Amino acid sequence: MATQRNLDIEERHVEKKSDTSLVASTFIKYAAYVLIFFGALYFLVRYVFPMF
C-alpha cells in the first residue's frame, strides 16, 4: 500500500539589507576619532615635548 503525503513547502527569500548611510556615518565618525587622536599627538610632539 503506497501512502501519499501532502507536504506544504514554504520558500523563504532572505535579502540582506545594508544601509549605506549608516556605514558612511560610522566611517566618518571613526575617521574623526583618528584625526583628533593624531592632531593631539602632533600637538604634543610639536609644542609640549620641546619644552622639556
Image: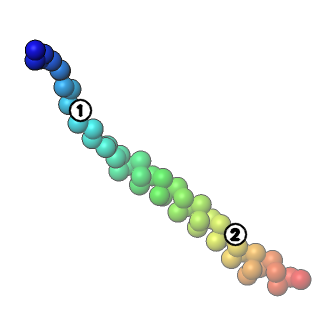
Q: In this figure, what is the number of numbered marks? A: 2
The residue that disc 1 covers is 12
Amino acid type for the residue under numbered disc 1: Arg
Element type at marker 2?
helix
Left of 44 or right of it: where is 23?
Answer: left
> Which of 14/43 is in front?
14
Neighbor class of circle 2 (other Cα within 10 Å; few <14, some 14-19, many 20+) is few
For the point 20% across and 31% down, which residue is it? 11
Measured in 3D between alpha carbons, the distance from the residue under mark 2 to the one under mark 1, in whole angstroms, is 52 Å
Q: What element carries label 1?
A: loop
Q: Can you give x and y, in whole percent of width and height, for residue 39 in the image?
A: 65, 71
Give percent across and percent down for residue 15.
Answer: 27, 41
- Which amino acid, by three-letter code, is at mark 2? Ala
Classify residue 9 as left or right of residue 1: right
Task: Where is residue 13? Give x, y as percent.
Answer: 23, 36
Which residue does the image show at 59% across and 65% down from the upper left? 34
Q: In which quarter of the image is the C terminus?
A: bottom right
| Residue ID for mark 2 | 40
Q: Quick one: label 1, few (<14), some, or many (20+) residues within 10 Å?
A: few
* Quarter of image, res 47: bottom right
8 vs 23: above or below? above
**Furthest residue toward right:** 52
- Left or right: where 32 falls relative to 47: left
Q: Which residue is drawn at 48% across and 53% down?
A: 26
Q: Is residue 43 or residue 41 the one in the foreground?
A: 41
Q: In this view, does 6 lie to the left or right of 41?
A: left
Instruction: Name the quadrant containing residue 37.
Output: bottom right
